[in-house]
Amino acid sequence: MLLNPLPYFQTIKDPRRETKNKLHKLSDILLIVLCAVLSGIEDWVGMEEFAEEKEPWLRRFLELPNGMPSHDTLSDVLGRIDPNAFQEAFLQWVEAALPSLLGEQIYLDDKTLRGSRVGDSTVPLLSAYAAKARWVLGRQAVGEKTNEITAIPNLLSMLDIAGSTVSIDAMGCQKNIAQSIRRCQGRLP
């Protein structure tokens, strides 16, 4: 169960002026967008539709005094907040929810980004996934004309994998990658 992110987002300053047209609480807007994005929604209209569809569930933990915000409101407010303040609040929430990877099973795998085909090329991404937490910990683009072997060390360098077990598919089973995992105090299955 994830921690409630609302207390972490209280530090974000509302960029809107205090007027009678300010109908929605910043915390409600942030949580709607966060829930929608975590559910795979990638556009503002989709986020509005998500909120309307999930309204009974959202009302269990959001006030929503004036109903659901429109996609224009979601877009406008998120476009105005300080991205650094949001990033800091989000990272504090994530670190509180998953303070350590100790004992975690981490899977490294590459997948092609859906809808990324341009001509004959696509955008492959290497992901690190924490199984118990069910979180994607990080992603690394796999360079053109290369494979995940070159991206794995870069992705591992971004993570504190001490005490976790790292699984990789057959292509990643290379001596230098195993040595990188051991240097970072990770374990191999």
Image: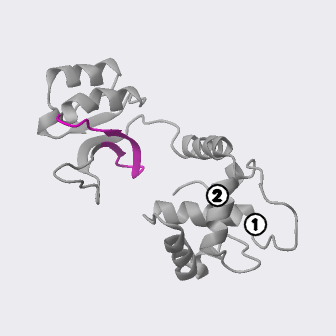
Q: Which residues are magenta?
A: 126-145
Q: Going 77% across and 54% down the picture, which residue do you hit?
A: 15
Closer-to-camera residue (173/78): 78
Closer-to-camera residue (130/10): 10
| Quarter of the figure with residue 85 | top right
* Residue 177: % across, % down: 22, 25
Closer-to-camera residue (75/3): 75
119 left or right of 16 in image: left
Tag of residue 78: 2
Tag of residue 25: 1
Q: Secondary structure at mark 1?
A: loop
Mark 1 Cα-neighbour bin, 10 Å: few <14, some 14–19, many ≥20: some
Residue occupying the far front of the picture: 119
90 left or right of 50 in image: right
Q: Is residue 138 magenta?
A: yes
* Residue 32: % across, % down: 60, 67
